[in-house]
Image (spheres, rainbow, N blue to C red):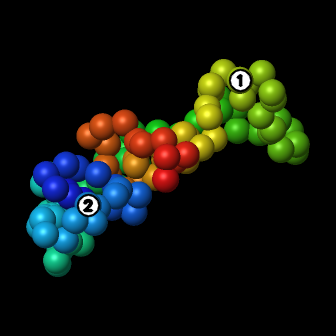
Amino acid sequence: MNIGGENTLACISRIDTNTSKTTKIYPLPHMYVIRDLVADMNLFYEQYTSIQPWLQRKTLTLGEKQLHQSIKEREKLHLNPAKAIGEIKALLTGYKTKPAPEPAKF
């Protein structure tokens, strides 16, 4: 959503509590609006699926065993779980105009 002229995630953004000042809330400017503040996400999800932004293995299986991620493979990702969740939420909501905020601040 666009809150106060800034594209942000409405679920974690703080809105000014000063009621003497008007806070303007709009849908994201680059998305089609279905109704009120509800944006049409179909094009976003089509584009998201077409680029396949998830980890993929070269080999699907190793015999009948399930393939587990080793500790060394996990270290290659350098992911802070809290930050990764924020990034995933931002990606899935179609909002990626600035880095996701740190969840610890909220």
The answer to whether the residues at label 1 and label 2 have Cβ atoms under 8 Å apart is: no
In the depicted structure, whether residue 23 falls above or below residue 102: below
Image spot of residue 70 (x, y percent): 81, 29
Residue at (13, 69) in percent of width and height: 20
Where does label 1 land, which residue? Answer: 75
Where does label 2 land, which residue? Answer: 16
Work out whether residue 42 can be spotted. no
Quadrant containing the N terminus in the rendered view: bottom left
Secondary structure, mark 1, is helix
Describe residue 49's horizontal placement relative to residue 65 as left or right: left
Residue at (40, 49) in percent of width and height: 90
Tag 2: amino acid = Asp
Image spot of residue 31 (x, y percent): 17, 57
Describe residue 74's horizontal placement relative to residue 20 as left or right: right
Front residue of 59/84: it is 84
Q: How many marks?
A: 2
Image spot of residue 6 (x, y percent): 19, 49
Tell me how far mark 1 sits from mark 2, CA to CA: 40 Å
Residue at (30, 37) in percent of width and height: 98
Describe residue 12's horizontal placement relative to residue 54 as left or right: left
Residue at (49, 46) in percent of width and height: 105
Tag 1: amino acid = Glu
Work out whether residue 17 can be spotted. yes
In the depicted structure, whether residue 56 falls above or below residue 86: above
Front residue of 51/14: it is 14
For marks 1 and 2, the one nearer the N-term is 2
Q: Quarter of the image holding residue 41?
A: bottom left
Which label sits in the foreground, 1 or 2? 2
Describe residue 23's horizontal placement relative to residue 58 as left or right: left
